[in-house]
Image: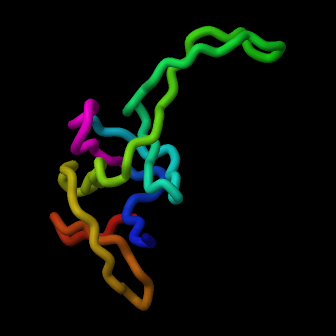
Amino acid sequence: MNKWRIKKGDTVQVIAGKDKGVKGEVLQIVREERRVVVKGVNVCTRHKKPSMNSPGGLIKEEKSIHASNVMLIDPKDDKPTRIGIKVIDGKKARVSKRTDSVIN
């Protein structure tokens, strides 16, 4: 599937799951599995062994969630929106379906 509407650095809102309603920034995209890592969402605690470089202990980190469970936040009205593609000046651009404005 080559229809990636969400990019790294976008602000998204979770629309399903245990963190429903939480907004955050996309930190990473895992294209092969169609998943995204969002800051502050799906936070898990790992136990890390001490080593020469790090003291170890409990580490909190974000795990990935499926891309279908997030919606992009429209920069104009700060609400979740669907995304479309339009050709503007010969180049493809992401467009908000809610306000019909171009998203960078």
Residue 24 in the figure: left or right of residue 101 = right
Q: Which residues are magenta?
A: 11-21
Give the image location of residue 47, x and y in percent. 59, 14
Quarter holding the C terminus is bottom left
With respect to residue 78, does 103 lie above or below?
below
Count of numbered circles in the view: 0
Residue at 44% from the left image edge and 48% from the top image edge: 36
Residue 81 in the figure: left or right of residue 64 = left
With respect to residue 60, does 27 lie above or below?
below
Give the image location of residue 19, x and y in percent. 28, 32
Residue at 38% from the left image edge and 76% from the top image edge: 93
Give the image location of residue 73, x and y in percent. 27, 52
Quarter holding the N terminus is bottom left
Q: Magenta region's main secondary structure?
A: loop
Residue at 74% from the left image edge and 15% from the top image edge: 54
**Which residue extends farthest front?**
33
Residue 104 in magenta stretch: no
Residue at 80% from the left image edge and 17% from the top image edge: 53
